[in-house]
């Protein structure tokens, strides 16, 4: 099994771990967003979605633990890469100018990542059945209660913009890392990446505003 | 086009040796002929420094026509200066204006030790190439033309990768000081051609292992390398290196 640890432990292998876990988070976010859109169907639709989800029982637990595992890998490997990259240039440049290529998204990747980690902890502490007693109330009530606070609405909207920024670099970047950079497909992947990041930022970001001011 | 002579101020990195901490020295340079190359400008500065009995600025250079890969330093924050697809020796002083303050720094990377002033030790690149090993090419009389059919497009792609002159600008430009563009060019130029296939797996594994050992950073797809590369090597090569590396890691027989 030495080949596996050598391959995954190398610089390219660590990037592969980031890419594959990142891709699964994009899948997760797509599912999460699709579920959340039931909010527009009203309280019953949203509560119904939550009930169906909980009715999955053991499957849900497996999915949750799987997600947690992927998350731990993404965060730990990301921090290792961040640290190694920081150490790779002990003396920094006095004048820093980009020759091109670098974007706000790519430059802020470790920082947006850490912000998203903090947000997820905050988000779970707000809504998760592991941290919030959900007996005698519905998830819709918990959510609409939370978004009575303009601070919560602001935090959630900001966090979703950060997620959009993270995905704007992460999406095309993960395909590049996996080795799928081809003149035929890369232009499409880049466009899809931008669309996905905007859809995530607006799709998730508008929900708190809708609940607080419209619903 | 600016005037024929300009006055500039150099803020140049001075460092006695690898152990020295180093600092910036401000050198006003008057009457710079704007048709000189950047290195010729440094030559005139050095002539003056020598006449004054001072230590001249050490900088690497050789062919001065943009093909050898020896020269290069970071000018105003950009490796090889502001020109696209050009080495430092091809940068001319007409690119600068009267009164400009120009910061000149060596390549910055843990893997490239500064030897003196603007000179860095790029031995790490040599060791990566050495670890890549050999290609199986028969000696003796020249083979028949087209004995190995290679499509034009493939030959061109291999040649695009082989255009890498190993100057190190990719490492200098990378926010993570990663050498992935260099290694990807060296792996690609051989992996694309049938002559390079027999050792392709071993080459990818060993070159990446050496790259990691030398202390370069990890690629995070900023694409700064591609933008700074004087030979415009594309990051498509990095994707190819990743493919070659995964394929070798998963499928190759243990050596």
Image (cartoon, helix red, strand yellow):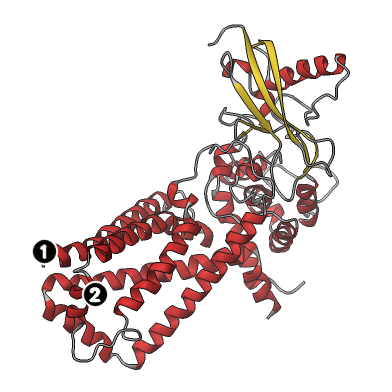
Q: Is residue A203 above or below residue B58?
A: below
| Residue at the (73%, 63%) spot, across then down | B202
Q: Residue B162 in the image: state x and y as whole percent.
A: 67, 42
B52 left or right, relative to A8: right
Tell me if residue B105 can be seen. Answer: yes
Percent x, y of residue B174: 60, 46
Left-right relation of B56 to A30: right
State the residue in front, B114 or A37: B114
Q: Position of residue A147 (x, y in %)?
A: 21, 69
Q: Count the marks: how many? A: 2
> Which residue is situated farthest in the top direction here?
B4
Q: Which residue is mark 1?
A: A214
Residue A25 drawn above or below residue B94: below
Q: At numbered mark 1, what does the secondary structure look like: helix, strand or loop?
A: helix
CA neighbours of label 1 inside 10 A, class few (<14), some (14 to 19), many (20+) = few
Which badge, 1 or 2, is on the more N-terminal residue? 2
Q: Which residue was labeled with disc 2?
A: A35
Q: Chain of mark 2?
A: A
């Amino acid at each position: 099994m030495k080949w596996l640890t050598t391959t995954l432990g190398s610089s390219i292998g660590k990037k592969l771990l980031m890419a594959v876990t990142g891709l699964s988070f994009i899948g997760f976010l797509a599912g999460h967003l699709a579920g959340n859109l039931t909010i527009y169907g009203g309280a019953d639709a949203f509560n119904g979605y939550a009930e169906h989800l909980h009715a999955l029982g053991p499957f849900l637990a497996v999915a949750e633990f799987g997600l947690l595992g992927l998350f731990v890998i993404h965060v730990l490997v990301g921090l290792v890469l961040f640290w190694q990259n920081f150490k790779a240039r002990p003396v920094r440049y006095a004048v820093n100018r980009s020759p091109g290529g670098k974007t706000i998204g790519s430059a802020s990747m470790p920082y947006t990542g850490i912000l998203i980690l903090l947000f997820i902890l905050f988000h779970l502490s707000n809504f998760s059945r592991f941290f919030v007693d959900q007996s005698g109330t519905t998830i819709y009530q918990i959510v609409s209660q939370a978004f009575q606070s303009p601070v919560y609405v602001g935090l959630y909207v900001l966090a979703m913009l950060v997620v959009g920024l993270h995905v704007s670099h992460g999406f095309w970047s993960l395909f590049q890392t996996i080795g799928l950079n081809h003149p035929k497909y890369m232009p499409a992947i880049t466009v899809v990446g931008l669309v996905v990041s905007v859809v995530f930022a607006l799709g998730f970001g508008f929900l708190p505003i809708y609940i607080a001011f419209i619903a | 086009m600016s005037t024929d002579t300009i006055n500039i101020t150099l803020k140049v990195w001075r460092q006695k040796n690898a152990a020295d901490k180093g600092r910036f020295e401000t050198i006003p340079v008057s009457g710079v002929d704007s048709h000189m190359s950047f290195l010729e400008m440094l030559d005139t500065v050095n002539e003056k420094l020598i006449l004054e009995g001072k230590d001249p600025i050490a900088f690497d250079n050789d062919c001065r026509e943009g093909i050898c890969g020896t020269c290069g330093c970071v000018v105003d924050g950009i490796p090889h200066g502001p020109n696209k697809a050009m080495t430092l020796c091809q940068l001319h002083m007409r690119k600068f204006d009267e009164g400009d303050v120009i910061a000149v720094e060596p390549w910055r990377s843990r893997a490239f030790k500064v030897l003196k002033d603007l000179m860095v030790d790029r031995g790490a690149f040599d060791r990566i190439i050495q670890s890549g090993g050999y290609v199986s090419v028969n000696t003796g009389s020249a083979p028949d033309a087209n004995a190995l059919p290679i499509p034009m497009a493939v030959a061109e792609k291999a040649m695009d990768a082989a255009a890498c002159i190993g100057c190190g600008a990719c490492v200098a430009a990378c926010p993570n000081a990663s050498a992935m563009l260099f290694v990807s060019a060296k792996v690609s130029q051989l992996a694309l051609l049938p002559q390079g296939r027999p050792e392709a797996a071993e080459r990818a594994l060993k070159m990446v292992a050496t790259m990691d050992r030398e202390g370069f950073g990890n690629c995070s797809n900023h694409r700064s390398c591609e933008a700074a590369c004087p030979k415009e090597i594309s990051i498509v090569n990095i994707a190819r290196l990743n493919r070659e590396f995964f394929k070798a890691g998963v499928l190759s027989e243990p050596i």
